[in-house]
Image (cartoon, rainbow, N blue to C red):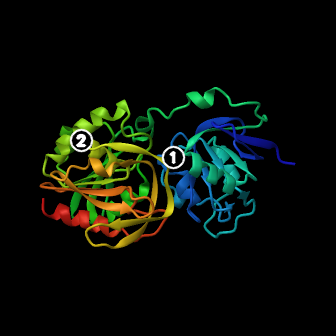
Amino acid sequence: MPDKAYLILQNGEIFEGYSFGASGETVGETVFTTGMTGYLETLTDKSYYGQIITQTFPLIGNYGVIPEDFESPEPAAKGYIVRQWCQDPSNFRSEGGLDVFLKSHGIVGLYGVDTRRLTKILREHGTMNGKITNVKPDGVPEELHRFAIKNAVATCSVKSAYTVAGAGKRRVALLDYGLKQNIVRELAKRAAEVRVFPYDTPAETVLAYKPDGIMLSNGPGDPRDAENLPVIRELRKLCDSGVPVFGICFGNQLLALAHGFEIEKLRYGHRGANQPAKDLFTGRTYITTQNHGYAVVSASIDGAVADEWFVNVNDGTNEGVRYKNKPVMSVQFHPEAAAGPRDTQFLFDKFSEMTEGV
């Protein structure tokens, strides 16, 4: 018989299930994602740093583990919760099972949980800390009230710069705040080379590379944290350089802070591959993949500086900004998909066209 295990939330709710993956206990911010596929991309997305991921789709693990689909070499999540764990995956690309993958990366898992009920609680009461444990809880552990995600970007960013050869004509500098590898792949299709820089690289160093464009990646945590303040100051210099800048997700939020706009924490965030984002200039709505718990406050966007570009159709929150009098744009969703719909990959083409004018 599998070992019993439990999830206890910060509000005292307890969920009973069974242990898989790494043994032991873990504490993290409990979130849910609505993707029907793409669990490998989810697990290897560094934007989940410090979080316990709940999959709303009931069957997870059915196509095994496929390293080619990873978005980073090492997952950053604190825990993983599913309704049904498939123990006999079937896929010609599979190189192993989910349980072994979780064990090898030290990720504590929990299956057999009523994920529908858990998701409804997180939607109604908001994202909250949780603990996975093999011991049935007696009250709410004090550590759930103390836990906070810290040093997220510094932990997830590359430690030294590296270059990836591409098939295009221009050079792109990519600042890594916890990037997804498909951003690199999409850029490399269109650029001669992509130079990936650590998150805290000074603007002077980035500009010395003489890039034709600058990309700001996705990443984890609260963009307002003190660790990001020097980064925001350097972004102001990059935006004033005249080199085209394109920000994705965390990059969208950092650009907003660099221009004096405000950030808010969402009740339960947007995580999944079915988020509708409306282009306010064309009126067209795109289905997008997203993973974020914070958003730019639409009312704080200074109309003399920028225009709101996209909004989320579900809740009206900001999904993108276009800046005036400078070649700078950003979106909150993930145009590189992986996993998710490819509806907005044209934004990479738009960015590539911007670099042609440098």
Residue assigned mark 1? 48
| Residue drawn 51% across the image and 46% down it | 48
Q: How many marks?
A: 2
Q: Which quadrant is the C terminus positioned in? A: bottom left
| Image: 193 above or below 209 | below
Q: Secondary structure at mark 2?
A: loop
Q: Position of residue 101 (x, y in %)?
A: 64, 50
Q: Which residue is mark 2?
A: 260
| Residue 177 in sight in this render | no
Residue 3 - label:
none
- Residue 224 is at least partly visible in this image: yes
Say which amino acid is labelled 2.
Gly
Compared to residue 203, the image places residue 306 above or below, namely: below
Q: Earlier in the sequence, mark 1 or mark 2?
A: 1
* Mark-to-mark CA distance, 1 and 2: 26 Å
Q: Quadrant of residue 319?
A: bottom left
- Residue 343 is situated, as x and y percent measured from the top left of the image, at 39, 71
Out of 319 and 103, give the one closest to the viewer.
319
Q: Which one is in front in this view, the residue at disc 1 or the one at disc 2?
A: 2
Position of 264 with respect to 208 (left or right) is: right
x, y percent for residue 280: 29, 66
Residue closest to the eye, 68 or 235: 235
Task: Characterize the local packing of mark 2: few (<14), some (14-19) or many (20 or more) Cα atoms within 10 angstroms.
Answer: few
* Residue 156 in the image, given as x and y percentages of width and height: 44, 40
Which residue is found at the position 33% from the left and 40% from the top?
Answer: 199
